[in-house]
Amino acid sequence: MRPARAHPLWLAFVLHRVSGLALALFLPLHFWVLSWALTQPQKLNQFLSFAEQPIVKIAEFGLIFLLAVHVFGGLRLMAMEWLPWSAPQKTLAAGAIGVAVLISGTFFLQVV
Amino acid sequence: MDADTAPLEVSVWRGDAEGGSFQQFEVPALENQTILDVVSWIQQYADATLTYRFACRVGMCGSCAMMVNGQPRWTCRTHVKKVLRDRHVEIAPLRNLPVIKDLAADMDPFFDKWIAAGGAHRPSASRDDPIPGIDPADGARVEASAGIECINCSICYAACDTVAGNPDYLGPAALQRAWTLLKDAKHEGRSAILDAVSGTGGCHNCHSMGSCTVFCPNDLDPMSAIAGLKRETTRSFFGRRK
Amino acid sequence: MLDLRLYMLQRLSALIMVPLTLGHIAVMIYAVQGGLTAEEILGRTQGSLFWFLFYGSFVLAVSLHAAIGLRVIVYETFGLRGTTLVGLTWSIGLLLLGLGTQALVAVTWPGGV
Ligand code: SF4
Ligand code: SF4
Ligand code: FES
C-alpha cells in the first residue's frame, strides 16, 4: 500500500477526498443546529455566542477552506474530464488551492 | 572493502498466494547493473529456486515489472544506482495482483480486464474490402496513437490506488486500450466500447490521481485517455436522452 | 463503484452546487460581520421564496452528492458491497435530506410551522 504517491495530482486527490468527507460529516451537525432557529431560538443564540470564541472562528475558517477547495478542485476535475483541452493539471490544482485560501482568508478577515 | 566494491544488500520477497516474507541476499555490486541483473544473479548463483519473469531485457515485452523499494518499475531498465538506498534495495512482486510465486505476479486479472474493457480488436472491414486510408495527422488518429505504445507491463495497474480499493475497476491500461480502439477508424463498434467502460468497474471510477501517468515507463498518459472516455460516455449519455 | 448513472448524478449535483456554494460563502462573509444571532438569520431568510428555493435545491443536491461520495469512500476503504452498500447510500442520502429539510423549514418557512 505505499508506492510513492506524493506527487501533485495524488495530493490533490487526497485533499478532495478528505475535504469531501469532512464536509459530509459536518453537514448533519450544521442542519441540526440550524433547525433550532424555530423551536429553540435561545439555544441557537447560546450556540452562536459560543461560536464567537477564537477557536471556533479558526474552525470555521477551516470549514470554508475545505468547502472552497472542494468546489474548485471539483471544477478542475470536471474541466479535465469534459473540456477537450489538456491544460497543465498541476498548475490548475495549485490554482484551486490558491483560490480556496483567498476565499477562506477573506472570510477570516471578516470575523476577526 | 571500500564503498564501491561492497556488496548490495537485497531483500527479495519469497512466497506464494498464501503469503511469504523477505529474504536477504548479498549481491556483488557492478558498475553497470539493472535490478533484473540483480535478480538474475541471485537465481543463478545464490538460490536457483527463485521465481521471476522476464523476456526481452530491453523494455519491449512488459514482463519484468516488479515493486522496487515499494515503487512499480520495469526492472530490466531500472539501474540499481538510481534506486539504491544505503546499498540496500527491496524487490517484491507487482502490487494489486495475486502472487504465483516469489517475484512472479499472476497477470490474469490484468488481461481479463483488458478484454472486459472491450480491448480485443474487431475489424471494421474484411480482407476482401479495400484497405481504408488512415491519415496520421487526423485528430482522432493522433489521440489513438498517443496510447498504442503500451507494453502491458501492468506498472500503471500496480500504481493505481483505485485498483487497490476496488477489485472490479478495469484499471488504467485496459481503459487506455479501449480509448485507442474508440479512436481507431479501423475498429468496429463504438457503442460496444462505450458500454464496456460504463459498468460498475468502468472509467467513471477513476479519481484522476494520475499515478498511472507518473509511473508509466513509456511516458504514456492513461489518466488523460480515461478522461477522454468519461467525456465520450457523457456525450453519449445526453445523446441517448435527446 | 460508480457506473455512468451515478457518475452523472454526482457531476450534475456538483454543477448545480457550484453557484449555490459560492453564493452561500458570499452570504456568510457578509452576514458574519458584527456577529450572528437567530433573529438576524431569520430576518434575512424567513418567508423568502428566494432563499427557500436557494437552500431547498442546495439541500437536495448535497444529499445526493454526499451520499454518492461517501458510498465510494466506504466501498474503497472498507470493501462494503451489494445490498449493504446500496442501503447505506440510501440511508445517508435520506438522513441528510430529512435533517436538511428540517433546517430549511426552520429558517425559511413564513412564520414557522
Ligand atoms: S488516474 Fe485513474 S487510473 Fe490513473 S492511477 Fe488515478 S485512479 Fe488509477
Ligand atoms: S500504460 Fe504504461 S504502465 Fe500501463 S501497462 Fe501500458 S506501458 Fe505499462
Ligand atoms: S524484460 Fe521485457 S520489458 Fe523488461
Image (tube, grey):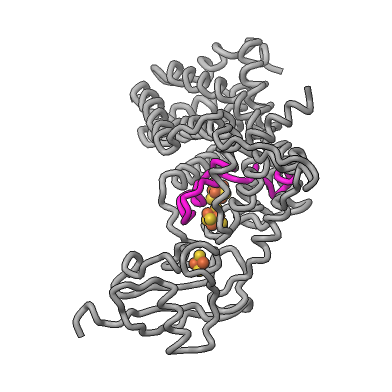
Q: Is residue B197 magenta?
A: yes
Q: Is residue C106 above or below residue A28?
A: above
**Span shown in magenta:** B196-225
The percent position of residue B143, horizontal first and vertical second, equals 57, 38
B242 sits to left or right of B78: right
Residue at point 41% right, 38% down? A90
Residue B157 vs residue B173, the one in the foreground: B173
Q: Is residue B71 above or below residue B212?
A: below
The mark total stands at: 0
The percent position of residue C74, horizontal first and vertical second, equals 63, 51
Q: Is residue B32 visible?
A: yes
The image quadrant where one finds the C terminus of chain C is: top right
A42 sits to left or right of B39: right
Residue B179 vs residue C59, the one in the foreground: B179
Q: Is residue B160 visible?
A: no
Residue at point 45% right, 80% down? B40
